[in-house]
Image: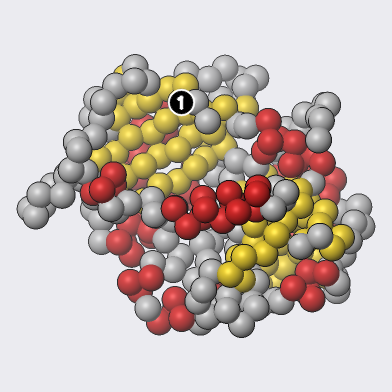
């Protein structure tokens, strides 16, 4: 994921190889910070207000002084201006706690622009295979333990990336995290959605998962698929019995789960409608 553009709050657009953080920045040394990744289509960031609102919520959980939303929006727009209207790219906006000096320090805030990967685009069109992994916590523990940072999108993504590497080593495209008692939680970088019994369903945030902006958009329009929207807990058997299931994220959109732990997941022709609602571009040709 090569960086194509870089902007730093208070400094504007800079060459992508500019050094922007001190060696003692808490975002580097502790993963102490928050971020959002935003899809950009036709030169415009999609759901920018929703992403910035979620970022503000993450910052409150961590106790980080996030700059005003208007400044963050201008920062995102500045890197988006580096893309042409016919390009599909993503923008990541990051806010760290700043230098770890023991004294209050201003946060480090920057945004980068990158190309959407061929694998993410292919997943939209062809679907993905998924394996399950345990997160090692119960489905209820994070709601009563704020230090576990449930619901926050933080820079501490080492576990998430390790889960994706495990999935790749197992020959799968992605991973789905489960609680220790087998409750479905979320993927390392996506939210799970499934259709069953006349409803479009996702996992409730009281399990400590991140509230998905793309999923919220989709469920708000479930009626366009002839379905009602529900947020409910589930186990693997619920996904195996589903009409169809997807992993949804801000840059990938919706990727249909074709197999889970090697077992096929239903296909009932709903993916085309889901893709239409979300409006993500589809590649004309892909190779598996």
Note whether residue 220 is visible. Answer: no
List x then y, in percent, for residue 226: 85, 61
Q: Residue at x 62, y 22 (%)?
A: 87
144 relative position to 197: left or right: left
Q: Residue at x 35, y 74 (%)?
A: 146
Q: Residue at x 72, y 68 (%)?
A: 201
Colouring chosen for the image of the structure: secondary structure
Q: Residue furthest left?
A: 103
List x then y, in percent, for residue 136: 51, 73
Count every numbered label the image shows and give the total.
1
Q: Is residue 140 above or below residue 31?
A: below
Q: Residue at x 58, y 75 (%)?
A: 179
List x then y, in percent, for residue 177: 60, 65
List x then y, in percent, for residue 214: 62, 51
Q: Residue furthest right?
A: 268
Image quarter (top left, top right, bottom left or bottom right) of the C terminus:
top right
105 relative position to 185: left or right: left
Given residues 151 and 133, the one toward you in this image is 133
Examine the image and state in which quarter residue 44 appears: top right
186 relative position to 96: left or right: right
Q: Which residue is mark 1?
A: 3
Q: Residues within 10 Å of mark 1 (few under 14, many from 20)?
A: some
Q: Residue furthest front?
A: 169
**Disc 1 element:** strand
Examine the image and state in which quarter residue 110 appears: top left
Note whether residue 253 is visible. Answer: yes
């Amino acid at each position: 994921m090569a960086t194509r553009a870089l902007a730093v709050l208070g400094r504007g657009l800079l060459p992508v190889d500019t050094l922007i953080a001190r060696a003692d920045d808490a975002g580097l040394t502790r993963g102490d910070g928050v971020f959002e990744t935003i899809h950009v289509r036709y030169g415009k960031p999609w759901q920018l207000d929703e992403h910035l609102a979620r970022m503000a919520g993450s910052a409150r959980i961590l106790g980080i002084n996030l700059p005003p939303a208007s400044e963050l929006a201008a920062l995102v727009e500045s890197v988006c201006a580096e893309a042409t209207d016919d390009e599909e790219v993503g923008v990541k906006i990051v806010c760290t706690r700043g230098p770890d000096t023991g004294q209050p320090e201003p946060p480090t805030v920057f945004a980068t622009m990158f190309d959407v990967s061929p694998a993410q685009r292919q997943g939209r069109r062809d679907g993905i295979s998924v394996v399950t992994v345990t997160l090692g916590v119960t489905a209820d523990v994070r709601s009563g333990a704020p230090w576990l940072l449930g619901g926050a999108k933080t820079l501490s993504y080492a576990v998430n990336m390790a889960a994706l590497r495990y999935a790749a080593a197992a020959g799968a495209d992605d991973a789905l995290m489960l609680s220790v008692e087998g409750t479905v939680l979320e993927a390392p970088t996506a939210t799970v959605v499934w259709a069953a019994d006349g409803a479009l369903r996702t996992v409730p945030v009281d399990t400590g998962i991140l509230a998905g902006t793309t999923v919220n958009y989709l469920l708000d329009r479930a009626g366009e698929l002839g379905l009602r929207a529900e947020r409910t807990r589930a186990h693997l058997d619920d996904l195996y019995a589903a009409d169809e299931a997807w992993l949804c994220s801000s840059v990938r959109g919706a990727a249909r789960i074709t197999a889970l732990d090697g077992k096929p997941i239903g296909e009932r022709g709903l993916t085309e409608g889901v893709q239409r609602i979300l409006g993500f571009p589809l590649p004309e040709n892909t190779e598996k």
